[in-house]
Image: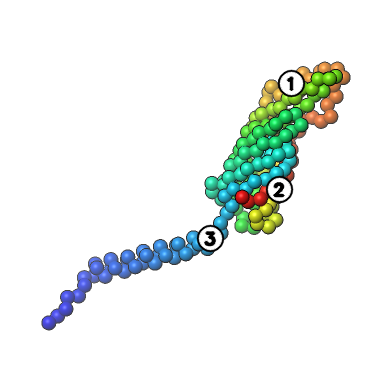
Amino acid sequence: MTKNKPSYAIKYLAISILIMFSVKIIAQNSEVNKPKFPLYNCGFGAGLDYGGIGGRLTILPVEELQLFGSVGYNFAGVGFNAGTSFRIITHKRIYPYCGIMYGYNAAMLVKIKNDTYNFISYGPSINIGLEWWLRRPRFLNLEIVVPFLSQNFQDDYQAIKKIPNIVFETKPRKFLISIGYHFVI
């Protein structure tokens, strides 16, 4: 009496199923060992991306992309900003990035006799910067920002310059620097 031997198709199917499960098990194991990136961070600092002197909340939907919002005080009033940045992943202590934001990008505080006039410009700005990780979960944020001033702000600035006895202590800058201290939340 001879025993029926399984067909080659059944053998290949069984081997294929075993290989698929082993690949899935290995893939799950490598996901556990993959480094986790912080999904949220909060920072305090000075500069356009902090609304002047203020705070900033950042969300990272993926490791390379930051979405942020900020609010702060800029001596002429409250400044708001929101933007996005693309991070270059280095897996070192320094992460360079570049981005764009919209919101407060210049302020003017003018005192004439007993009256004070505040002018705040809102518009787009571009930035390049570095995240310098001190120790997880903290880092310094250093940034250079190039604001694109609104035409209304530029017109107001030129008109105020023509008023006698008005002396500007500073002029609108072509680029600005910001610095902040962040921690993962």
Q: Which residue type does callout 3 highlight?
A: Lys
x and y, in percent, of residue 138 in the image: 67, 53
x and y, in percent, of residue 151 in the image: 68, 23
Q: Going from the N terminus, do you reach mark 1 or mark 2 first? A: 1
x and y, in percent, of residue 158 in the image: 77, 21
Question: How far, Cα to Cα, is label 3 from label 2?
Answer: 26 Å
Q: Going from the N terminus, do you reach mark 1 or mark 3 first? A: 3
Q: Nearer the viewer, mark 3 or mark 2?
A: 2
The residue drawn where x is 65% and y is 30% is 123
Pointer 3 and pointer 2: residues touching (CB < 8 Å)?
no
For residue 27, the mark is none
For residue 34, the mark is 3
In terms of image quadrants, where is residue 159? top right
Q: Label 2: which residue?
A: 181
For residue 156, the mark is 1
Dot 3 falls on a residue whose secondary structure is loop
How many residues crowd around disc 1 within 10 Å: few (fewer than 14), some, or many (20 or more)? few
Work out which residue is located at the far right of the displayed protein and give it.
165
In the image, 6: left or right of 165? Answer: left
Q: Which residue type does callout 1 highlight?
A: Asp
x and y, in percent, of residue 160 in the image: 79, 20
Dot 1 falls on a residue whose secondary structure is helix
Q: Which residue type does callout 2 highlight?
A: Tyr
